[in-house]
Amino acid sequence: MAHAISVAKYGGPEVLEYKDVAVGEPGPGQVKMTQTAIGVNFIDVYHRTGLYQQPSMPFIPGSEGAGTVTALGAGVTTLKVGDRVAYAGSGGGYSTERLMAADRVVKIPDGVDDKTAAAMMLQGMTVRYLLRRTYKVGPGTTLLWHAAAGGVGQIACQWAKHLGATIIATAGGPEKCAIAKAAGATHVIDYKTENFVARVKEITGGKMCDVVYDSIGKDTFPASLDCLKPLGLFVSFGNASGPIDAFNLGILAAKGSLYVTRPSLAAYTSTRADLEETANDLFDVVKKGIVKINIFKAYPLKDAAQVHRDLEGRKTTGSIVMVP
């Protein structure tokens, strides 16, 4: 019998229940995997609270993990039993065993351990599409990245530095600002004590940024728009402080004919080719040491409620994993 964290009703961390579950055998095009590490992300909180509604209840949260293939369904020829694999974006991750569509998992290359793979798939592939496709960052790019001490932010600072960008990062408090700076941020703004719009203006000599990456939401909007140069791009990819409501499109004209996008990893990895390209690019920069994955802590799976308390209480930096 496998074990999983089940959610029967939306609510606080207390709704995360550790239960026995029956996994069954893989169907056509599926693999069964024993998970060795499970990634934790803020989107898991959105699922638990109901901010992002689930298709049915109860459900098993969790969007990424790593482990070993233990059985193959009919028609699966690209994988074999014993392969180490990882995935991101498929719900049901908070479990010791699970079924996965074979075309949604990728092989973990030698040189990347399971915990690192589980900790980086969703966050790392998110950074990859944001920096390489949503806006093609390179030398000459000036960008603003909010919450740069978090798991996504640390990966982004390292990768964007490698690409030659000028990175203006925000973080809360001296300790988190130091983490962002160590990850490669060119300039760091403490949003708790400084006005980030005024500081961006000062840092850029009034030229402002080509692109702003914002996973905070309500607390940083619309101020994030004021950090952009004319024709700049505002990328909203999360709502850690709550969703942005009542977006008046006219504000984009008033602030310089700005562009806005709300991208998702699912859209950027919807085809097998896109998924492989994105994952392989991520594995490459990690294996080369360009991006180091900072795992803040590995918690037991049964302690998922405490994990969520720590995550929502902003007591974590870097990436978090759970182990069965």
Image (cartoon, rainbow, N blue to C red):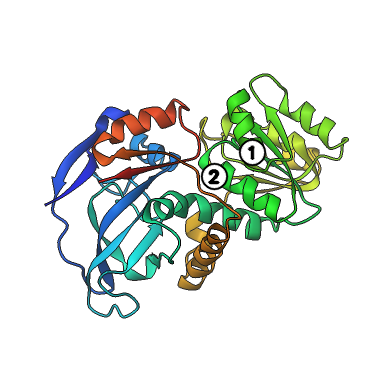
Q: Position of residue 202 (x, y in %)?
A: 84, 30
Q: Distance between the residues labelled 1 and 2?
A: 14 Å
Amino acid identity at mark 1? Ala
Choose the circle earlier in sequence order: 1 or 2.
2
Please identify the quarter of the rendering in which residue 190 is found.
Answer: top right
Q: Is mark 2 on a helix, strand or loop?
A: helix
The answer to whether 6 is drawn above or below residue 37 in the figure is: above
Q: Is residue 146 visible?
A: no
Percent position of residue 2, x then y = 16, 51
Marks 1 and 2: CB-CB under 8 Å? Answer: no
- Front position in the image: 117 or 144: 117
Q: Is residue 253 above or below residue 191?
A: below
The residue labelled by disc 2 is 152
- Left or right of 96? Residue 85 is right
Identity of the residue drawn at 34% across and 48% down: 38
Q: Residue furthest left?
A: 1
The numbered mark at residue 266 is none
**Residue, far top:** 193
> Under tag 1, what secondary structure?
helix
Which residue in the protein does label 1 denote? 182
Q: Identify the residue at image location x=15%, y=61%.
A: 24
**Front position among marks 1 and 2:** 1
Q: Residue at x 72, y 28 (%)?
A: 196
174 sits left or right of 296 in the view: right
